[in-house]
Image (tube, coloured by chain):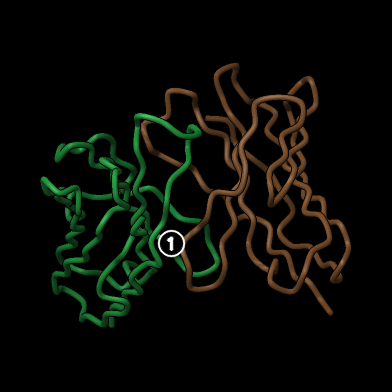
């Protein structure tokens, strides 16, 4: 069973630039959620994708967007980067078909630094 | 979703039992209590979930009183590798994937 993987591991961008982060979900999982975790804080829900459609969104502006592909992998795109976007971005996969409610499998995250 | 309150930090020593209590006064009938563990530079990991009474797995036990307004995560005989942040979450039974994390409890296990 392959776990959740994310790329890249680290990334440094300049304010105003755009970034794309990638996630491969765990085998058999059709749902991917993205979270932003600032230093010293708990993860904050950005949005979720289920079968290539957005299936819920947190309190993040439209410059945060995403995609899910037929193989259930996913991308998080952030436009017009701001200094406050510096954080650990976590991807989590799950299956709505079974398992404990609320059980999600998280990847190791991508550390984004905006200068 | 019900808000959760848990201690910001706790210290313990190797071999001791650690109990982390979480308050969720406004928990709804269809909510489950869920705990995650997060090590530095890693994503959170699901530990345990319960609805009422006691749940035990190979990692931890979860105690939930009858009124369900609080819960206690119990870690038996902790080791240095249990040093992590522990998050208590309330999850709706029809969960659509939006997990609400608080600040969590930072557990420091000392030798």
User: 10 Å neighbourhood of mark 1: few (<14), some, or many (≥20)?
Assistant: many
- The part of the image, by quadrant, that contains residue A84 is bottom left
Locate residue A8 relative to residue B36 in the image: left or right: left
Residue at the (38%, 61%) spot, across then down? A107
Q: Nearer the viewer, residue A68 or A97?
A: A97
Locate the C terminus of chain A and report the quarter of the image it occupies: bottom left
Q: Which quadrant would residue B62 be assigned to in this image?
A: top right
Q: Nearer the viewer, residue B33 or A86?
A: B33
Task: Tell me: residue B50, above or below residue A108.
Answer: above
Quarter of the rendering occupied by the N terminus of chain A: bottom left
Which of the pair A14/A21 is nearer the observer?
A: A21
Q: Is residue B37 above or below residue A54?
A: below
At a point 30% along the width and 43% down the height, the residue shown is A29
Q: Which residue is found at the position 62% from the left and 43% from the top?
A: B48
Residue farthest left in this picture: A70
Q: Position of residue A92 (x, y in %)?
A: 36, 52
Camera-side residue: A27 or A64? A27
Q: Residue B80 lies in what quarter of the image?
A: bottom right
Image: A31 above or below B109: above
Q: Residue at x 64, y 66 (%)?
A: B84
- Which residue position holds label 1? A37
Q: Tell me the colour chain B is drawn in.
A: brown
Residue B4, how many percent across, how many down?
Answer: 64, 40
Image coordinates of residue A79 in percent, x first then y, are 15, 63
Q: How many marks?
A: 1
The local secondary structure at tag 1 comes to strand
Mark 1, chain letter? A
Q: Which chain is green?
A: A
């Amino acid at each position: 069973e392959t776990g959740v993987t994310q790329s890249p591991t680290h990334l440094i961008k300049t304010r105003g630039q755009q970034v794309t982060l990638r996630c491969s979900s765990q085998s058999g999982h059709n749902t991917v959620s993205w979270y932003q975790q600032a230093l010293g804080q708990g993860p904050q829900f950005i949005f979720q994708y289920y079968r290539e459609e957005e299936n819920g969104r947190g309190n993040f502006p439209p410059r945060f967007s995403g995609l899910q592909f037929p193989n259930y992998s996913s991308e998080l795109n952030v436009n017009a980067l701001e200094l406050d976007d510096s954080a650990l971005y976590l991807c989590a996969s799950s299956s709505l078909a079974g398992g404990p409610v609320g059980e999600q499998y998280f990847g190791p995250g991508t550390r984004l630094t905006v200068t | 979703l019900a808000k959760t309150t848990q201690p910001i930090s706790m210290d313990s020593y190797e071999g001791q039992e650690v109990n982390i209590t979480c308050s969720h006064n406004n928990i709804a009938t269809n909510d489950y209590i869920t705990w995650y563990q997060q090590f530095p530079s890693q994503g959170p990991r699901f530990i345990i979930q319960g609805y009422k009474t006691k749940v035990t797995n190979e990692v931890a036990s979860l105690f939930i009183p009858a009124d369900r307004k609080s819960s206690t995560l119990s870690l038996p005989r902790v080791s240095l590798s249990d040093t992590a942040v522990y998050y208590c979450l309330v999850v709706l039974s029809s969960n659509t994937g939006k997990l609400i994390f608080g600040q969590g409890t930072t557990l420091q296990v000392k030798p």
